[in-house]
Image (cartoon, grey):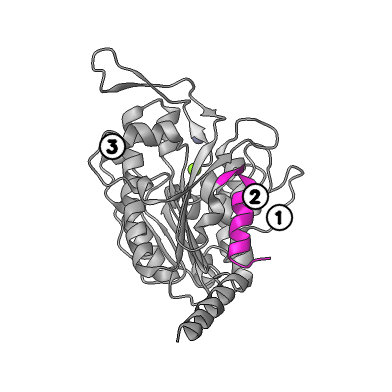
Amino acid sequence: MLLVLLAIVSAYSFTNKSKPKKVKKVIFIIGDGMGLAQISGAMSETNERNAFERFNVIGMSKTSSSDNYITDSGAGATVFAIGKKTFNGAISVSVDSVAYPSLFEMMKKKNMATGVVVTSSITHATPACFYAHVSSRKSEDDIASFLLQGNCDIAIGGGTKFIKYRKDSMDLTALLQRNGFMVKTDTSNNFTPLLANKQVYTLAFDGMKRKLDGRNDFLKQASLSAISQLNHNKNGYMLMIEGSQIDWGGHENNYEYMKTELYDLNETMNAVLDYAEQQGDVLVVVTADHETGGLSLHPNKENKKKFIANYSTGGHSGIMVPVFAFGPGAENFGGIYENTEVHFKFKKLLGLE
Ligand code: MG
Ligand code: ZN
């Protein structure tokens, strides 16, 4: 009996070793401009469940771009999408402006599903890198046109301007519909789920309303809706969710702005982790492209249990950013590495090479 049991156990561990479980479902969450000071400060001042503490694999990503120790969000997301360091402002093109295939493009070749949900416009630098290739992040009209290629099945966020009210006075709606997308464009900031596997849904003229100005739980609702649509694809999916405006609060050195946007992301992360825990086959990775504001938490002489949020720049800083991973394959994200490695880890786990 014991021998039989031992045989079963060793056969089991053998199969486990020789066939590492392939990851088919990835939820990649980016807090733009979200460094450790942002996370530490904000999460010390809330009673909400700390989603960051639900991860047991933590790594560190070195964020520099090809031409600058301090990256921008274009170069900062290009590394995730195509695995190459590039110049600041670039959208998934190399240093010599060559378009290399992105994770989304490789996934579409394998008939997997892809999507982005963001609080900026869907054509802003971070989401753009996942489905477009242009040498300047400012070309948001051009970036929107890349959606027609069909490498991003679901795009939800702001940016009605770049679909309907473009400089070339083209309206992309009919073209997108002809390519199989359900399209909804308004400026309501009010999300109602669309039941479509392919959809372009913009709810604001440009970026979404700030949390401080009354944005609701759009990010959580839209993310969960996108996940349920992407999950229809049996080959698997990647959804990129961005807390875009954590960065914008940082640029304004507006701690309240940053903090409320980070809470919004925390709430979304908790919902995603609840789902991933229940499913068991979803890899969730959370990181940032860079830190914004050079934020530090200074001593507060009036109240020694509190801190004073002190910004050292209106731009980005060059400090490493944390990477949090949960689910199958999470163990690959421990350690300290260049930001490009995030791309190669996903590529390997998803079997894209
Ligand atoms: Mg961004
Ligand atoms: Zn920024």
Q: Earlier in the sequence, mark 2 or mark 3?
A: 2
Secondary structure type for disc 1? loop
Q: Would residue 271 appear left or right of 147 to someone viewing this image?
A: left
| Mark 2 lies on residue | 92
Question: Which residue is drawn at the image coordinates 35% and 62% (left, top)?
Answer: 224
Q: Position of residue 301 (x, y in %)?
A: 28, 12
Badge 1: how crowded within 10 Å, few (<14), some, or many (20+)? some
Q: Are marks 2 and 1 in contact (CB under 8 Å)?
A: yes
Secondary structure type for disc 2? loop
Of the pair 156 and 327, the residue shown nearer to us: 327
Residue type marked 1 = Tyr
Residue type marked 2 = Ser
| Mark 1 lies on residue | 100
Note whether residue 91 is visible: no
Q: Earlier in the sequence, mark 2 or mark 1?
A: 2
Residue range (magenta): 335-353
